[in-house]
Amino acid sequence: MASTPPSHAPSASMSRSKTSRDDRRSQADSMLRSALSATGSDSSTSSTPTTSPSHHSARRHNSKKSSSTSTSSSLLPGLNSRLTEPSKSGRERPCVDNRPLSFLSRSSSATASLTCDQLHTAESDGGATQAKTPEPRLHPKKRNLVERLQRADSAVAGSPSRMTAAEAKQRVRELQREVDRASAASPQRSTAGLFKAVYSTDLLFLIDTTGSMTDYIDAAKEQVKGIMNDIKEAFLNEADVRIAVVGYKDHGDTPNIQFLDFTPSADRVRQFLNQLEAIGGDDTPEDVLGGIQQAINASWDQQSRCIVHIADAPPHGRMLHNLARDSWDNYIEPGSEPHGLLHEPLLRQLIQLKINYALLHINSSTDRMASAFSHIYAAAGADIKLLSSNTYLHDGGVSDASTRCSASAGLQFEELQLGAAYSTLRHLVLKTATSSASRTANRLSSSLSSLGKAGAIGGRSDKLASNLDAIDEDVPLEKVSPEWETPGWLDETLVVEGFCPDIVVHSGSTLNDMMALDENIKLSVVELTIYARSKPFSKGALRTSSYARTAASTDRFVVKSFIKSGKGIAHLAEDLRCQALCKAFALEFNALLEAEHSIDFIVTACLQGRSGMRLADRCISLEPLIGGEYVKYNSNCGYVNEDEGQFNQTAQAFSHFTFERSYGHFLITDLQGAGPLLTDPSVQTLDEERFKLNDTNVNQEGFKFFFATHVCNSICRKLKLKSNREMVMSGNYDFRERWPSLDSTVCCSNKLCRRIIRLASAQKSDDFPGHQWCDTCWPQLESSTVEWICIAPGPYHEFNASKFFYESQGQPTPHTCPEHRERDTTVSGAAVVGGSLWNRMKSSNQKRSISGRSW
């Protein structure tokens, strides 16, 4: 990609608050330095930004000629003992034949490998004729090899990628200014009215009005007013609800079809139902298709649309029933009815109109109709739910449709058991209406991300509908299994730098600080080489995903790239801050519950290529590849997974917890992932200026979407969460205020992992002081350790370096041993010691509980 860091235009002025904060830090450094000096503290504390592992000790090459060994070591007095320092195993590690001593030249993106054999050969060639002299000298061939490394490293050392701690800090400041500029340039918009636009519902009753349906018609008459009130209350008394009725008989009856178009008046619906008389019917089937055609012609207008079909007889046509005799159907051949209708074109029109379909099952005569209808909806990607008692559940592939349940489905076909229990009609209709609205909201969720909030919220439902239909992008995808071990399959090399969340220790005040101010969600700078597949394997509303790996890790990653231009590093930086905040909530949530309810969020890095190289302007994100079955638990627009499994209950309770813990200022939804490891969450905010660049943040409307469908479970009750649907409707909230202060918890020290780990189970080593590692990252520290040639001036010697360790800290592996490595003078030694001391002082005086209101 590129050879210079991402360019951020400097702002015209610096915030006064930022400048004063820096001044205060500088004064604090001076005061701490003086105090430490007065108490005899060692002022020579290492000031490198990252502590170098102690086992990276310089080691002299084990030459076969002892004379050259003794003379070489005399170049620097006292170096011999240091160069022969044993490795962490307690003895010198022997030189392994043909083991490469690798050096990655970032200026040329090429790798030069020197094996120990090459060095032995260079030393031995002509060695017999070389006269011994008191002046130490390397053989010319060996010296040439070392000089090659020195020249390559000089080119790298002169590049701006080797930044000091002060430069990294300045880079983060520049990023924040870029985010501020992008937020200021983002058009002012309000999400007010989105909930009403999505959840306003058109509900059509499609009713068989022949002789056997008298009791069901009477039940509809008695319950219609309650049904309308239930739906309005379920939608927080904000949504508009309209009801229409289509009554159908058979072809020989007059009238054959009776119709009331959509009306918001429950009294008008009741009056119309009073006019319906349950008589007629000739043969066994009825004119179902004629009723569906009339339903299609109704004045559908609201975004949430649903048909509730109440019937005890199938349509005409041998493909839609299983009657024992053809003579029982006067129009046995499909299309032979007087109107000539076929079910497939009619169902496709319903799908085109975005109408959800619910069949209230009375008896088994409608089983084949339900199966045939569900197939048409399934072909359009709808969510399908058939009763387990359906005769055709496992016939002709219907089994696949019956279990098809996807969070991404925008429509739904479901079969619900009504039977002879007329009193359940009200409950089933309410369930159907809320499920229909949830599917509509889920469909809208994608459009919000693709179009941006300003584009999706237009006030008029017809404008909103047109926007919903114009969001798909034709991106070719590669549908093959990843070939991780095939050389060259990851066919794109990306040399990038960027940012990732700086999350290590979580104390009692961490979450409050992060909620209070975006700048308290700390970021750090990383430099990486990534090997990626050039062809994406999946896409979402905004971005494509490709398989990837980093240069020094065996972990598997995903690179995500924007489908459309217009979004850059500022948008990605806001996304990763959202994920860091989610992880902070998860740390507290986990500490309040048993281990089986623990959740975690992956962290991402937002990256950009260096300018001057190919793909320099490309902004990408890098995140771990999640294995296992991917599940969506809820969305930012009210979708709720109905699975009764334990982790689904945990996920729903976690969303509720974030609203309660933040005192109604934040709500984390869009929970999805594999098991307890989640990705791509959405943060809804009370303050419309927070996370403004995130298109999935619909602010207070997101609160309404959540509580319209959320049902508190045992975990919510265990956490003593108070907020509920009624409070959202009234605007009067009551929150749990006191929360226990938690002991400090940690995340894995790998900046590309940051998995939450319990302090007692964290892997630690004296070789990596101050770091904690998860079980996945821990073994890679050793497995990636290589022998490097130290290129510093002086005698030839080697040292051990863990390439994974440096990559995990977002740094290139150094090419000088720890003794020859220059210290970063921009880091204050007093700050390192004083910061640790200050943290210990704070932790020793922690409060027993935290006020949710206090932040």
Image (cartoon, helix red, strand yellow):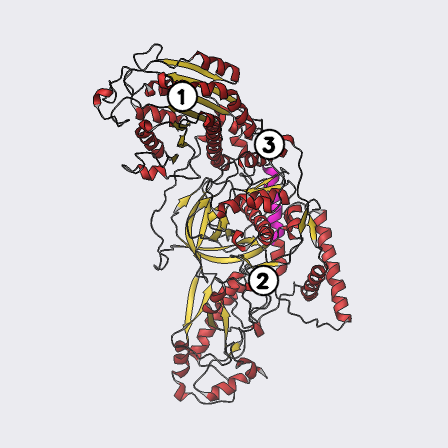
Residue 76, horizontal then vertical, whole percent: 57, 82
Mark 2 to mark 1 CA distance (whole Å): 60 Å
At label 3, the amino acid type is Ser
At label 2, the amino acid type is Leu
Tell me: 175 left or right of 224: right
Element type where label 1 sits in the image: strand
Looking at the image, is 656 positioned above or below residue 813? above
Mark 3 to mark 1 CA distance (whole Å): 38 Å
Which label belongs to residue 190? 3
Q: Nearer the viewer, mark 2 or mark 1?
A: 1
Q: Along the line of sight, which residue is nearer the eye, 110 or 222?
A: 222
- Give the magenta range: 171-192
Residue 179 showing in the rendered view: yes
Q: Which residue is mark 2?
A: 759
Q: Which residue is mark 1?
A: 206
At label 1, the amino acid type is Leu
Element type where label 2 sits in the image: helix
Q: Earlier in the sequence, mark 2 or mark 3?
A: 3
Q: Magenta-highlighted stretch: main secondary structure? A: helix
Q: Along the line of sight, which residue is nearer the eye, 26 or 820?
A: 26
Tell me: 639 left or right of 836: left
Looking at the image, is 443 positioned above or below residue 477? above
Residue 265 showing in the rendered view: no
Tell me: 666 left or right of 484: right
Specify few, some or many for label 3: CA neighbours under 10 Å numbering under 14, 14-19, or 20 or more: some
Q: Earlier in the sequence, mark 2 or mark 1?
A: 1
